[in-house]
Image (tube, rainbow, N blue to C red):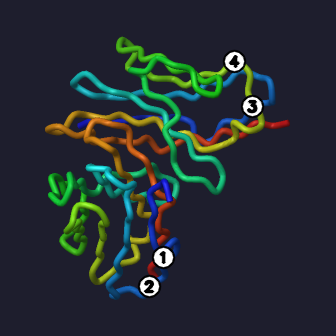
Amino acid sequence: GAGVSQSPRYKVAKRGQDVALRCDPISGHVSLFWYQQALGQGPEFLTYFQNEAQLDKSGLPSDRFFAERPEGSVSTLKIQRTQQEDSAVYLCASSLEPQQPQHFGDGTRLSIL
Amino acid sequence: AQRVTQPEKLLSVFKGAPVELKCNYSYSGSPELFWYVQYSRQRLQLLLRHISRESIKGFTADLNKGETSFHLKKPFAQEEDSAMYYCALSEDSGGYQKVTFGIGTKLQVIP
């Protein structure tokens, strides 16, 4: 496909479980971003990758959040010991080059029970 | 810290009426401003950016540095304009664009 692909689209987990969210950026895109969008809010920056290097993780809310992009393409956002406040839509975006506009995926809607 | 304010969560206008979605920002440097749109059941997509100075789907936005505003305008609203609109500001964070979004305004165009 031509766009950013995220999976799963929906994820329900019990509090305390670990979850992993996947992002397939547009092929060849160097930059990859993760955002968290709580209900009624705009997306908030979590972390940024340039190829395989995680250059900015200043937005990760706690050390329970971990992201990786080992081969510079697919990225995974992992949340350990989930809490109810982690419930949100997690958006992934990619751009061809760091200064170019970002293209967003559909997001993963995470619900923690 | 940079901040983007969209004062209206919901804006309802009649078809054919003018539209203005307000956006104010605070940023100490030279900002780059964007408007993103999310139609029902679609992904977030870029509508326009201030440096392009172009009109997309009849929408325009002018950066007013004196008033620190970047309002989105359209002279005649269409039903298909109904969507969520997010104003966003990006800063150069060492070679990449770190984006801050507003909370969004839902535009409802009444037939």
Question: Looking at the picture, which amino acid does disc 4 mark?
Answer: Pro
The residue identified by callout 4 is B75
The residue identified by callout 3 is B13
For disc 1, the neighbor class at 10 Å (few under 14, some 14 to 19, many from 20) is some
Q: Are the numbered discs 2 and 4 placed on the same chain, yes or no?
A: no
Question: Looking at the picture, which amino acid does disc 3 mark?
Answer: Val
- Distance, label 1 to label 2, CA atoms, is 6 Å
Going by the picture, which residue comes out furthest to the right?
A: B111
Circle 3: element type: strand
Question: Looking at the picture, which amino acid does disc 2 mark?
Answer: Ala
Q: Is residue B10 left or right of residue A103?
A: right
The residue identified by callout 2 is A13
Quadrant assignment, res A102: top left
The residue identified by callout 1 is A111
Tell which tag, 3 or 2, sits nearer the viewer.
Answer: 2
Q: Are the numbered discs 4 and 3 placed on the same chain, yes or no?
A: yes
Is residue B71 or residue A99 the one in the foreground? Answer: A99
Which numbered disc flags the more N-terminal residue, 4 or 3?
3
